[in-house]
Image (cartoon, helix red, strand yellow):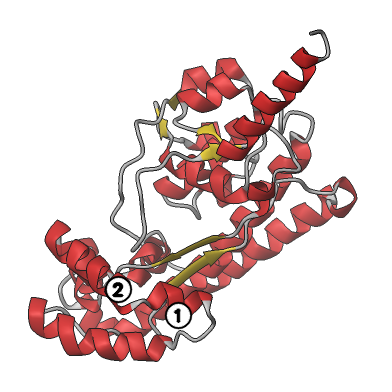
Amino acid sequence: MAYLTKHTYSKLSRKIDLKTKVSQQLFMKHILNDQKLYYIFNSVELKYLFNFKLLFENNKEQMEHYLSYVPKQKDEKKYVFETKRKLKYHLSSACSFLKKDFLNFNIPQEIRDLGDVAIEDYRSWFKKEGYAEQYSEGILDVSVVVFRYNNIFPMKYGVARLNEKYNLIEEIPNSSIEREDSKFNYHTFLENIEDLKNDYAFHFQCKVTRTLSKFDYLLQRSDTEIANKISELFTPEFITNYGMDRVKKMFVISKRIKKELMSALIDYFKWTYRSTLHSIDTVTLEHFGLECCHSCKENQIENKLKASSIYV
């Protein structure tokens, strides 16, 4: 029996590769029998939901058929303190690390796009300034970080200045994946899905806007990247005529609706597969690139020693 945090399930669902594309048929069979819902998500989101469902279902035959094992975790160059450590699984629901929050500091996309030298330069600067320590002490002023960044990196690397509302801190409350059965109501779930589908249909009424919604991940990118991608999808004049602000507004709406849809579907998976949530074996998890939490491993060894001492 193993326990994973919501964050670990989420990250694992993004990292595991699928051996096949999530077709409409596959979606309706494994996720929800709803054709309209399928067309709201892009391929990455479909993979994420499909992986989540397979992990919760914990059917070895299905996992071997559809999932590819995860290679050793790499530094994705996304965070200041990102490491190559493996994701963890826990052997006890009482482990304190099971509810430890995820905290890190984002590296601006413009810096990431420049490659390793600029990324390491930013990381060194951030650490040298002691911003992580300031955050832990409750005295970090993000506007000061942005101001100092704008005085250094745009001139040094020719990148755009950061907006004062830049999302510097990535903090995700971590908790067990458990859900109280009494809080889930299947009919309410279906009504919620229907309401969100109607919300999507209201805002994305034509093929152009529905296509835009598939690229809402661009909201985190620079205006230049957005304009380039939109030009590829439509015409170079599209942004000029439609407006960058309108495009971003559509992205925001799309992300909101899809986030709520995915959250509802994941709650549905938890409820449906509540009996198998913690029955996934540790060998399978290790094949997927996870390792046992250090604290859990120590407790396991200690318990074995205590048990063996009884017979001495």
Count neighbours of disc 1 (C-alpha within 10 A) and say few if under 14, some if 14 to 19, many if 20 or more.
few
- Residue found farthest to the top: 311
Residue type highlighted by circle 1:
Gln
Residue appearing at x 78%, y 36% in the figure: 274
Numbered label attached to residue 142: none
Q: Position of residue 116 (x, y in %)?
A: 16, 57
298 and 195: which one is in front? 298
Please give the label number shown on residue 134: 1
Q: Residue furthest front?
A: 312
Q: Position of residue 177 (x, y in %)?
A: 70, 46
Q: Percent from the top left, x then y, of residue 302?
A: 69, 27
- Quadrant location of the C terminus in the rendered image: top right
Residue that appears at 71% across and 49% down = 267
Q: Secondary structure at mark 2?
A: helix
- Residue carrying label 2: 126
Residue 229: in sight, yes or no? no
